[in-house]
Amino acid sequence: TFRMLNGMVGQWSRRRWLIWHLLDLSITTDGSQRYSIGIGGDFDFPRPDRLEAAYFVQQTGTQPVSYPLQILQSMEDYSQIALKMLQTWPQAVFYDAAFPIGYVYPVPIPNQSGTYQLHVLIKDTLNQFSSLTTPVNLPPEYFEAIWANLTIRLGAFYPGAVITDQLKGVAVASLETIRTANAQVPQLRMPSRLTRSAIWNIYSGTNY
C-alpha cells in the first residue's frame, strides 16, 4: 500500500497543477559552463524534471536588477548554439534533466564574478510516506484527493473490488478542486516582431 501511495505521490509531483508552490533556487555564478541540481549539487535540492522559469540577477549596490532568461526546451536546441563556451551576459538557460543529478547550462556563460546570481524556479515536491506515523504536511484539499484516488488505484489490483461511480466522481472532483486552487496562468507575451504601435481612432478618440 505504501508503495502504491508513494508511487501516486511521485506522479503528482511531476504535474504543475498538483503543486501549489514554486521554489526559487539561486547560486552565485563562478564562470562554470554548467551547475548541478540535485541532492548534494550546486542547487542542493531534489532533482526536478524541468525548469518552470529562470532569471539572472546583477548585484548592483542595494538594488539588485533581475533579467529574465529564455528556457531552451531540448538538447537539440542547445546543440544548435555555435559558441557554447562564450562568456558574456546570459540570455537563456538549458536544463539537462539527467538522473540522479541534473545540470543547468546558462547561455552564454556569465563572466566569473561574485556579483551575479542565477535563479531557477522549480516545482516543490510532495513528501513521500514511510509509515503510518509519517506526519502529513499538505493543504487540506489534498486529503480527500489522496484517499479517493488511492482507493481506485488499489482496487485495480484486487479482483472483485467494487469501484463505484460515486467514488470515481469524488476522485475527479477532488483533483479538480486542487487544479482550480493551484492554477496560475502566466501573462501572455508576444514576440516584438508580432506587435505594432497603437493606432489612433478618429471616431472614438482612443488608441487601438
Image (cartoon, rainbow, N blue to C red):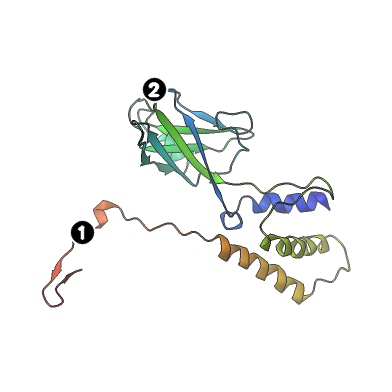
Q: Which mark is residue 196?
A: 1
Q: Residue furthest front?
A: 62
Q: Residue at horizontal 44%, vertical 23%?
A: 30
Q: Secondary structure at mark 2?
A: loop
Say which amino acid is labelled 1.
Arg
Q: Which mark is residue 113?
A: 2
**In the figure, 147 relative to 41: above or below?**
below
Where is residue 196? Give x, y as percent: 20, 59
Other-residue count near label 2 (Cα within 10 Å), few / some / many at <14 / 14–19 / ≥20: few
* Mark pair 2, 1: CA separation: 39 Å
Foreground residue among 74 and 205:
205
Foreground residue among 186 and 15:
186
Horizontal arrangement in the rendering, residue 168 relative to residue 201 (left or right): right
Q: Secondary structure at mark 1?
A: loop
Q: Quadrant of residue 199?
A: bottom left
Where is residue 113? Give x, y as percent: 39, 22
Horizontal arrangement in the rendering, residue 207 relative to residue 98 (left or right): left
Horizontal arrangement in the rendering, residue 198 relative to residue 68 (left or right): left
Q: Which mark is residue 161?
A: none
Q: Say which quadrant the C terminus sits in.
A: bottom left
Q: Point out the tag, 2 or 1, that comes first from the N-terminus.
A: 2
Q: Residue at horizontal 64%, vertical 34%?
A: 100
- Number of marks present in the image shown: 2
Q: Residue at horizontal 14%, vertical 73%?
A: 205
Q: Does the CB distance between marks 2 and 1 fall below 8 Å?
A: no
Where is residue 103? Give x, y as percent: 53, 32
